[in-house]
Amino acid sequence: MDDSDSPVTDDVVTMEKIVALCKRRGFVFASSEIYGGIGSTYDYGHYGVLLKANVKNEWWRAMLTERDDIVAIDSAILQHPRVWEASGHLQGFTDPLVDCRTCGKRYRADHLSELQCGRKPSKHPGETDECDLTQARDFNLMFETTIGPVKESGSVAYLRPETAQGIFINFKNVLQFSRKKPPFGIAQIGKSFRNEITPGNFIFRTREFEQMEMEFFVAPDEAQQWFEHWLAERELWYTGLGIRPDHLRLRAHDADELSHYSSGTSDVEYLFPSTTPGGGARWSELEGIANRGDFDLTRHAEFSGEKLEYFDQASGQRYVPHVIEPAAGADRATLAFLVDAYDEEVVAGEGEGSGETRIVLRLHPRLAPVKAAVLPLLKKDGMPELAREVHRAVRTVVQAEYDDGGSIGKRYRRHDEIGTPFCLTIDHESLGDRTVTLRDRDSLAQERIAIEGIAEEIERRVTAPWITPKLA
Ligand code: ATP
């Protein structure tokens, strides 16, 4: 996290509220809870799975459906150990680690100002007289394992710390079989593993996480222009899905932050809340976009002996493509969408829930785990049967839920908290005229719509252009 700025954070929800909502509504749980938990590892429950799947689907949509210059790949997590020699991870994928001789805890040396001292929670490590920190030393973040039945004689392998290398090592395969030529990209979503020294801040930094990475291969003299293209595209992706523009920014890396091979890197940063008491909100990396030059293909060519280049028949030129990489995290993006969507409001007027405070996730309808809830007002008089009919129709086009548990007010609150944009209530009138009440999550407006064609109507509303009401 970047601690250089501590902006005004009145409109950023606390992480405690997000964690509590995620647990209460079954989005995300601490993993292995019945055994006392395993630090900073999380399991996604039903609504969390649906939400994260929607985030990933929107990423695929932006990469594949809406363009024709990117193809997909799904590479193995376990790769030849030479991959990590060539990529530089074996030697250089390290974070600076310090130990405290007093409390016995370990800290990431460049994150001390965000961490709590093991003995005095209100202080940062190194701030009290008792703290006795060692010099920082390099700690490699890759998880090591062995392949083969006998540990001693098995060969060492690593759980991939990023998905990108699985793309580079397939460059030749893709070039051969996809009928693509630069400029073109290869995109991948998958799990990555990093033995982070200080994971935390809920699902912001964990040791096992999902990445959404795309490597875009271009002619060397076009690299800068494509770098700028991807900066703009990726920022638009987040705001298009509802993130408030004033909670998102692009920050160019300073020269001393750049990898030696990169001629430019910018982070898309989001104003994340922190779990550290009094931590407030901080601008933190959501996605990194790098102009990586020809480093990756050159290194893999050198280490593997394979030629990884492109021959342009039109110009007669042979070159090693340069790479522009937008690298995002599916879990971090999911967290940003949750944080940005969270709202509490006192319901005004005379209607439903007037005067009460409701919690509502104002998620973009495309991201919402459930798009429509079908609610029979009563469990009698034929209402459940008609509601089932409506549910069967709506579920053919979107994720929909039939819900008859508790009072109608309670059901509305439940669906507000998981971000369901449309509630469809079946009442006495529905039985007579085959209409339902459609309640809008954000405005609380209610209107009657016909059951005939209801699936198409919900689909139309879910895919319609949407702007977060927080901007109104
Ligand atoms: P950080 O500076 O936060 O450690 P990074 O610069 O090492 O991140 P990259 O290697 O650029 O991250 O990875 C691309 C993306 O993968 C990040 O922007 C983030 O969204 C996600 N990511 C990286 N590490 C983690 C992690 N430990 N937990 C969750 N997501 C992660």
Image: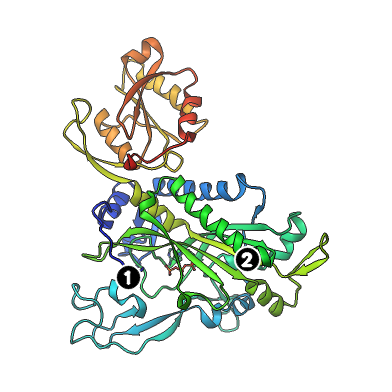
Q: Amino acid at mark 1?
A: Ser
Q: Is residue 394 visible?
A: yes
Density class for disc 2 (Cα within 10 Å; few <14, some 14-19, many ≥20) is many
Q: Residue at x 33, y 80 (%)?
A: 106
Q: Quadrant of residue 433?
A: top left
Q: Relative to 353, does residue 363 appear above or below in the rendering?
A: below
- Along the polypeptide, which appears first: circle 1 or circle 2? 1
377 or 180: nearer the eye? 180
| Spot occupied by residue 460 in the image (x, y as percentages of width and height) | 49, 29
The residue that disc 1 covers is 4
Percent x, y of residue 195: 44, 73
The reply to whether callout 1 and callout 2 are in contact (CB within 8 Å) is no
Quarter occupied by the C terminus:
top left
| Residue drawn at 21 percent across, 81 percent down | 127
Please state which of residues 364 and 422 is positioned toward the viewer in this rendering: 364
Q: Quadrant of residue 324?
A: bottom right
Instruction: Indicate the secondary structure of the residue bearing disc 2.
Output: strand
Q: How is the image coloured?
A: rainbow
Q: Is residue 471 left or right of residue 78?
A: left
Q: CA distance from mark 1 to mark 2?
A: 30 Å
Amino acid type of the residue tagged 2 in the rendering: Val
Q: Which is more foreground, mark 1 or mark 2? A: 1
Displayed-image quarter of ligand 1: bottom left
Which residue is depicted at the point 35% across and 41% down? 362
Residue drawn at (34%, 42%) of the image: 471
Quadrant of the image for the N terminus? bottom left
Residue 323's label in the rendered image is 2
Q: Is residue 189 visible?
A: no
Q: Which mark is residue 191?
A: none
Element type at mark 1: loop
Does residue 409 appear left or right of residue 250 in this picture?
Answer: left
